[in-house]
Image (cartoon, grey):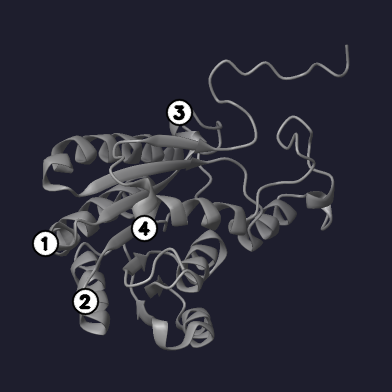
Amino acid sequence: MRLTGKVILVTGSTTGVGEAIARRCAAEGAKVLVHGLERDLGERVAADLGSCAALHVDDLADADAARRLVAAAVDAFGQLDGLVNNAAWIVRSNIDTTDAALFDRAMAVNVRAPLLLVRAALPHLRRAEGCVLNIGSINGYCGEANQLAYSISKGALMTLSRNLADALGRERVRVNHINLGWVLSPNEHRLKVSEGLPPDWHERPPAEFAPAGRLMSPEDVAAAVVYWVGDESRPVSGTVMELNQYPVIGRNPVKDAL
């Protein structure tokens, strides 16, 4: 039980990676505030976790949602030790389709909300000598042509993580960051099917992207998160870690066709 006595707020935790994080944190002894947009999905997760979970439904595009979320966690459990900024708007867009409204929403959900959540949580994190873990993406380094706004937002989130780690270190509030590679969540499976891949596409992932023969699972991510929100990683702060199957820098894919 590596998180006994801790209260962790996990945004976007009614499905996918966030749900796996919430479930793993609870299994490790933490009390968890589950958050999402769909009440029915959130109630299912919270019911499964029982007395160690509470639910708050809110839209992070609303600038006041951060205050409400932190208040919900503290009202439910009396403290806040860790914040996992997992929620994100994963949107397809390129230079031709990224208009002002789309860009503003991507930045509001993916960058502004994590910033405001840290700001709202900071008094409690200072008291607990707690931590923030921001869930980013390797798209933050460049990204695909059809993920322009999303990639920009993840690059900004990475800078936010480094800046706050530097700024808050002397207050013993740690900020770390994980950049995820390709993760097989239910939403990712549905998205790829909607874009034309067969229903069993995940059973034969391209070797270039999945050298292990399978994509990472949400549970793989959750296992890593436990280390970063727990005391085992103390006093490390400011780390940006790629959780991926291959190096981002200096990658030289095997040219099987040659």
CA–CA distance between discs 1 and 3? 32 Å
Please name whichever residue, 139 or 123, is drawn nearer the observer in this view of the structure: 123
Query: Which mark's residue is nearer the viewer, 3 or 4?
Result: 4
- Looking at the rendered structure, the kind of residue marked 4 is Val
- 130 relative to 5, above or below: above
* Horizontal arrangement in the rendering, residue 222 relative to residue 200 (left or right): left
Query: Which mark's residue is nearer the viewer, 3 or 2?
Result: 2
CA–CA distance between discs 4 and 2? 15 Å
- Looking at the rendered structure, the kind of residue marked 3 is Tyr
User: Label 3: which residue?
Assistant: 141
User: Label 2: which residue?
Assistant: 74
* Image quadrant where one finds the C terminus: top right
SS at circle 4: strand
Q: Along the polypeptide, which appears first: circle 4 or circle 2?
A: 2
**Residue drawn 77% across the image and 18% down it:** 254
- 168 relative to 21, above or below: above
Crowding at mark 1 (Cα within 10 Å: few <14, some 14-19, many 20+): few
- Res 2 → quadrant: bottom left
* Numbered circle sitting on residue 188: none
- 18 relative to 29, above or below: above
Rendered location of residue 99, percent (x, y): 38, 42
- Res 152 → quadrant: top left
Q: Do the numbered discs 4 and 1 sit on residues whose CB atoms are within 8 Å?
A: no
User: Label 4: which residue?
Assistant: 84
